[in-house]
Amino acid sequence: MPSLDDLTRPPGRPPRLLYGGDYNPEQWPEETWTEDARLMREAGVTSVTLGVFSWSRIEPTPGAREFGWLDRLMDLMHAHGVGVVLATPTSSPPPWLGHLHPETLPRDEDGRTEWWGSRQHFSHSSEAYRRHAAAITEALAARYAHHPALTMWHINNEYCTHDWGDEAARTFRRWLRDRYGTLDALNTAWGADFWSQRYGTWDEVLPPRRAHYTKNPTHVLDFRRYTSDLLLECFRAERDIVRRHTPHLPVTTNFMPFWSGQDGWAWAAEEDVVSVDVYPDPRDPHGGQYNAMIGDLTRSQAGGRPWMVMEQAAGAVDWRSVNRPKPYGLNRLWALQAVARGADAVCYFQWRQSRQGAEKYHSGMLGHAGARGRVFRETVRIGEDLAALGPRVAGTRLVTETAVLHDWDSWWTGGQEGAPSARVDHAEIVRAWHRALWDAHLPVSFAHPHHDLSGHRLVLVPHLHLLDDAAIENLTAYVRGGGTLVCGFLTGITDQDDRVRPGGMDARLRDLLGIDLLQEWWPLDEGERVDCGTFHGTLWSEELTPAPGAETVAAYRGGELDGLPAVLRNGRAWYVSTLPEPAALGALLASVAHAAGVRPVLDGLPEGVEAVRRGELLFLLHHGAGPVTVPLPGRHRDLLTGAVTEGSVKLDRFGVAVLEEHEPAPEEVRP
Ligand code: GAL
């Protein structure tokens, strides 16, 4: 399969990192394009994504093909040495499609239509939509297959639509038939005898539309699985068209970061290059950790291979209630942080900031202030940095010894109506555990619960409510094979149909974790904390009876749970029945990691400094304010500045150093 390596390490040329962004030049008169190309060169841009929202320009009336403007752009980019990631424009159909074929428009669960006038108004189930999307994809691929600027395909954009309408009902039934074969099997999986929901014919089965009261949770779960799969069908259809024309070029689609709508494992397996859009909030004090987590997840989805930041913001976004810009240096810090965590391409939404349309207040690499503005000056600086790093970084990998298990199937069971606590948020819990590891400078990857875990010394399960039998067997085999496992609360409560396991938690897991009886859950309210002796727990607490031989490492103090385990250890398997406050969770995971033989990247790092090893290089990234000195024995050379350091490295606010060990040249050695 073609990969990012083919673009970043072409034979006979030094490796490089891709740099650029979405380029939507149909907004501008053509004189501007020439200026854009000149400024792209100044900024070291090597790659732009064209055509993401160009359907109505290419096909202004049904069946028309207006490619002249795109031909000129492709040629212009090529003449300036900028490669083109060409997007299929299928995420935003032209108004004529909805007008001619109202059935292409999705319906929400209340039956309301999502009209054109914004974007992403297509139904994954609509036969007419799929036909028109395939036709425009075919035309685009045929036209540009041999264009020398074309480097990669970008299918659609952030697949995220839903549909509860009539065509969706038809494809939902088809999907359910494939999954269950018979209505009996469906009725059993859904527990349809509860509340008289037993289906007698397939035509009675509908998407989980607006209803009087709590919906059947397995029905809702299957609808989420189905939605992800139907969108994936749309992706595959377009991918196969472009592959037929250009089997030598990689294909991607850009994920939203840590997004619940698509099964990220299943989707990544269908791509040649895994790419993501990531927009940490500049005001979030943990924005850097969030960016790191998205990098870790995306790299893991790519199987450890280099991945691509398809979009980020050079400054402010326009979709939070208050949109603050990035202070100078933060854009560079987060861009280089992505590189540290395995990205070989750093791209943005979008190259030139719009003057019209819904996103005119969203930053661009070239902002409204133009080439003299500080945003563009930083754009130029990042281009220089990436050019300096490319030859040493592109294609290299990270080594991690800790895996965090994450799975969309399980995520989809969380947040359902009728849960013991509406405050339990899968994504927040995963983020809290990742943050604890980030604070402890422990490099991590993510893994699916079915993945081979034997290469990891430590496996963490922050929150996998649903675990099928294969996952449970995998976890038990991992510990039997010598691995160390830490599970958070609500692990393995339900099976693949979201049916509660006998005893309230899978018996094999209870055995593994040293739990004799899981009695009752005691979820905690906002602001409520439980005393666990040496720390406080939040969000959740649990009444459980330990099995003989299991060790209560920390116990609840006072209240109903007095003396019961908050942290339980059974050999190399640990169970944490609450969410410890951040510092306590960090300390707990760091000490379990230490016992498992996992070491931080560096010891003694000052607060706010992140250290990551990629290949043979050490990245130091300073997320805090004010200058810091990082103790670092030996001599090192910073690839960004050429400076040689000895014994320590100084970093300013948002400073970055990318260091290689430096042997003194013979003339530097004093006699
Ligand atoms: C992404 C999208 C881009 C742009 C960006 C703004 O979700 O793919 O087209 O809208 O957000 O932050």
Image (cartoon, grey):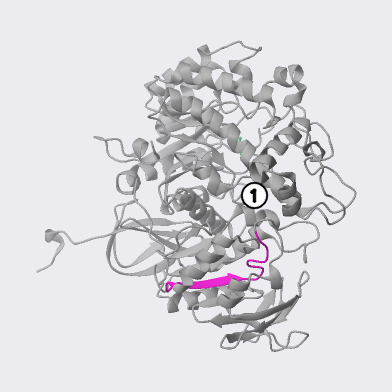
Magenta-tinted stretch? 481-495
The x and y percentages for residue 190 are 75, 53
Q: Nearer the viewer, residue 596 or 120?
A: 596
Considering the whole magenta stretch, tell me its main secondary structure: loop
Q: Which quarter of the picture shows residue 427? A: bottom right
Residue type pointed to by label 1: Ser
The x and y percentages for residue 252 are 49, 36
| Magenta-drawn stretch contains 489 | yes
Q: Nearer the viewer, residue 663 or 443?
A: 443
| Left or right of 311, for residue 128 | right
| Left or right of 485, for residue 385 | left
**In the current view of this chain or complex, which residue is farthest to the left?**
671
What is the quadrant of the C terminus in the image?
Answer: bottom left
The x and y percentages for residue 453 are 45, 63
Above or below: residue 525 compared with residue 219: below
Above or below: residue 130 compared with residue 460: above
| Left or right of 98, for residue 134 | left
Q: Residue at x 64, y 37 (%)?
A: 230
Above or below: residue 578 compared with residue 38: below
Whether residue 634 is visible: yes
| Magenta-drawn stretch contains 379 | no
What is the quadrant of the N terminus in the image?
Answer: top left
Q: Indicate the quadrant of ligand 1 in the picture.
A: top right
**In the current view of this chain or complex, which residue is farthest to the right?**
212
On the image, numbered disc 1 is attached to which residue?
Answer: 260
Above or below: residue 224 compared with residue 147: below
Whether residue 114 is visible: no
Label 1 SS: loop
The x and y percentages for residue 438 are 51, 65
Mark 1 closeness class: few <14, some 14–19, many ≥20 residues within 10 Å: some
